[in-house]
Image (cartoon, helix red, strand yellow):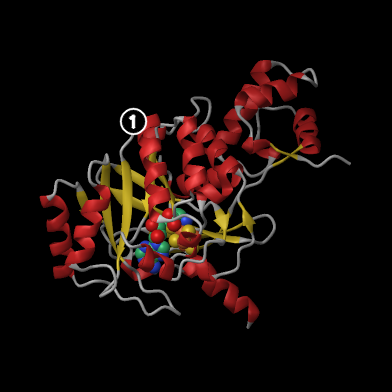
Amino acid sequence: MLALKDIKSMMLCELKEDLAADGTEEYRARQVYEWLSKGISSFQEMTNISLKMRQALQKKYCLYGVRIKKKFISQKDGTIKYLFSLHDGGLIESVLMKYEHGYSVCISTQVGCRMGCSFCATGKDKFLRSLYPSEMLSQIQEIQNDNGINISNVVLMGMGEPLDNYDNTVKFLKLISSKDGMNIGMRHISVSTCGLADKIYKLAEEKLPITLSISLHTPSDNFRDEIMPINKVWKINDIMAACKYYIKMTGRRISFEYAMIKDFNDGKKDAQNLVNLLKGILCHVNLIPINSVSESNFKRSESCKIKKFVNILTQKGINTTVRRTLGPDIEASCGQLRQREESHKEE
Ligand code: SAH
Ligand code: SF4
């Protein structure tokens, strides 16, 4: 028997073509697609589609998606953290944040992560698999439906390394920005990477108007080697060369993420080295006061140190912001919920 096709990972044109082969009219394909964009979880919910066709769809396609397993609402700022389960029992996390300009979601791209960064809860846990485009889309749809809202911004900064799941991530970007689908413009989407230089070149060729974020965290290869194993493969110079190519191809400003770790990367010298590294590059720096995770001794930098760091960067003309700490009472850093849930299972 042929494997069922993942219908939610298809573009409208692909579905039309697929259904036309069975003699289905184009307007029917469009109706089916509208239901898929609403985030339905069974073909039976397609009430304007005949029973016969729903049965035929069920024989040919599967509906991959995510289901809410747990939900934590911050009493401080309303941020909501979701623990979702997948059809094969995998667990992932997403976060809904409210900003002045609307709602933003942070979604996962993999169940776990293979990159093993020492400060990250996800990197310490088992890697199971990459997510399908449908499962990335479904995180947003479930959150929209759960809250009765429309999401305006999406960040791929949850569990996993998006560029280690390259094809599915790019397909997801095309699906979510499609006028036939959720229609969230690529300018409202950020993709964050630990720095897979070869994939940054590849992404540059796609010329997508997304924002690319590089998790740099230090301007020193020695320090980076200590906290990010990927630095053994791609050095900072490799990443910077890829970034320059990316900017040349897309004309887009790159955002550099920098987790502020007490007495590790938050000194005056680090700030000056960062200035030298980023000189002349179309960029923005986003400082993230690090969230402490279990099994690592990293502590958040003191706020006076963060302020000094910002001053050095801005004085040299580098646009810098400090990320607001959202949902401090619900364990904000991604990967922690899944870690806790999995360890309960083993007990
Ligand atoms: N794998 C991608 C995207 C997911 S991680 C990447 O690494 O960029 C999203 C962001 O959270 C990255 O910038 C990552 O470095 C950061 N991060 C991970 N653990 C963190 C922690 N404990 N505190 C603060 N930021 C963290
Ligand atoms: Fe993976 Fe990103 Fe965490 Fe590193 S920081 S382990 S790349 S999710």
Q: Residue 154 appears at what percent x and percent y?
A: 41, 44
Task: Give above or below for 10 relative to 145.
Answer: above
Q: Can residue 332 be seen?
A: no
Residue type pointed to by label 1: Gly
Question: Image height check: is 149 above or below 114?
Answer: above
186 sits to left or right of 321: right
Assign a secondary structure to mark 1. Answer: loop
Q: Provide the residue designation for mark 1.
A: 251
Which quarter of the picture shows residue 88? bottom right
Along the line of sight, which residue is nearer the eye, 40 or 213? 213
Residue at point 66%, 25% (across, down): 14
| Residue 229 on image: x %, y % | 49, 65
At horizontal 27% and vertical 39% (from top left) the residue drawn is: 282
The picture quadrant for ligand 1 comes to bottom left
Q: Residue at x 49, y 31 (%)?
A: 206
Residue placed most toward the observer, 318 or 142: 318
Farthest bottom residue in view: 347
Compared to residue 260, the image places residue 161 above or below, namely: above
